[in-house]
Image: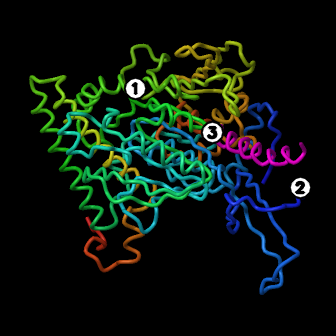
Amino acid sequence: MATFSTSFLGSITDVNHIRSPLLSHKLVASSLCFSGQKLQLAAVSTVVEMGGGAKFKGTHMREKKLTDMIENKVTEAQEVCAGNEGSDECKLAWDEVEEISQVKAHLRAKLEHEEDPLESFCSGNPETGECRIYDD
Amino acid sequence: MAVSTVYTVQALNSSCSISTPTKTHLGIQQRQVLFYSNAGKKTNKGRVRGGEIRCAGDTIVIGLAADSGCGKSTFMRRLTSVFGGAAEPPRGGNPDSNTLISDTTTVICLDDYHSLDRTGRKVEGVTALDPRANNFDLMYEQVKALKDGIAVDKPIYNHVSGLLDPPELIKPPKILVIEGLHPMYDQRVRDLLDFSIYLDISNDRDMAERGHSLESIKASIEARKPDFDAYIDPQKQYADAVIEVLPTQLIPGDNEGKVLRVKLIMKEGVKYFSPVYLFDEGSSISWIPCGRKLTCSYPGIKFAYGPDSYFGNEVSVLEMDGQFDRLDELIYVESHLSNISTKFYGEITQQMLKHADFPGSNNGTGLFQTIAGLKIRDLFEQITASKASAPLEATKA
């Protein structure tokens, strides 16, 4: 591995020289594209349409359950808060929506960047219902 | 490049334990104490046994205040990546555990210290943001125990069911991160922290991720704001580093919110923590890297650096407005920052590339989160080094 002096102040001409050692490191991200020096470091915020969906039936069921929960809790919050904003019940209702939203966001992020959460369980128990491979 | 010092060990302190060496990760210098015995039985292989000695009080505690739920935030992933290895939930345990464990780091979610479950909170009329929903006594006891090298049975708060599940065993790690809404709320817990960070990502609410509409996201933020301002926000004053996200100033009248202005506010005078600076420490700098040497696309990049006062504390603020578009912009910026605690030239760029698909990879959030991770690594190594030299000092006296 090449070593560089930390007091080196780079100029643009040296950047090209640096590119290959950095590239030789294992790059996990699949959304990089290289053409000359152009690199896409796009912030991926819309995870919904991208790949990396649920692998196991159990995870798919959980995702669906969370989506339903969010919908119900949002409706509930809107009802409770109608004309009653600032009340404790209103705060609580939206706090619950927030809590479940975070769970769903994490599940999506995990599916996107890591493995299906049931992976380790299912590798040891492939015959259980939850571990059936989910096909769209 | 390896430095070894030979000590004669009189007797092992009973609070020390011996474990077989773990893999050494790139980027972390593990202090390995190898011991050789010339007395006693030979092993089967006829060779001396070696191992790593870890003594009580080796654990470093980092507090992370964030409102994005626990353990899976982008910041945590970047941090564990800097230390090497991937952090995973404990294998074979409760699948809804919030805890993450890697070789060096354990991340505990402070929601596990909820004294009220979802039903309980409804009955009492308090949100999860309210301190009354949390058991700070237990939080303090357990964090203190882990810091002293004692394993604990920590409760689990199940975010799906909203119930408190049976506890899981947590063993003291090298680095303990306590993440959640109230890491710095209780004074006793605060005093246990070696370093604390406040992540202000209140603007980071993505519609598609959250699973509900923009209006309901706004309503949810509005409804939680009073509790947030009363209980969570004030923790900023105690944090050693704050990452704040604001709208850009580069695009007049912008309401898309895609380009961000991010501030890294660093407390001065914190032991083992030297704030990042631009060009000349303690002065005020305004820097636009784009020009003759570096071509940027619209809206470009703008940096600012300078001393300031924050909640009565002396701080240094590094600010980035704009976006990275290309690799050479990143490396150019990295080469002009000082005190970044990298181990080799281009380490920040490499870390950002490694997680190019994470949110914030093209702006100040990713940059400052990566820098914060490197600062924590630096802090860890300094503290570990100072602890190792302390016994030697004692024998000299």
Q: Residue at x 59, y 20 (%)?
A: B302
On screen, residue A35 above or below B233 = below
Is residue B37 left or right of A16 when viewed as pictured?
A: right
Helix, strand or loop status at disc 2? loop
Helix, strand or loop status at disc 3? helix
User: Residue A71's quadrant in the figure?
Assistant: top left
> In the rendered structure, which segment of residues is drawn in magenta?
B374-397
Give the Cα distance between marks 3 and 1.
23 Å
Report crowding for label 3: few under 14, some 14 to 19, many 20 or more residues within 10 A (C-alpha). Answer: many
Of badges 2 and 1, nearer the viewer stands 2
The residue positioned farthest toward the bottom in the image shown: B44
Residue bearing mark 2:
B5
Q: Which of the pair A90/B152 is nearer the observer?
A: B152
Give the Cα distance between marks 2 and 1.
55 Å
Q: Which of the pair B338/A51 is nearer the observer?
A: B338
Q: Which of the pair A10/B10 is nearer the observer?
A: B10
Residue bearing mark 3:
B327
Is residue B339 left or right of A111 when viewed as pictured?
A: right
Q: Which of the pair A24/B234 is nearer the observer?
A: B234
Q: Residue at x 54, y 30 (%)?
A: B364
On screen, residue B297 above or below A133 = above
Residue bearing mark 1:
B257
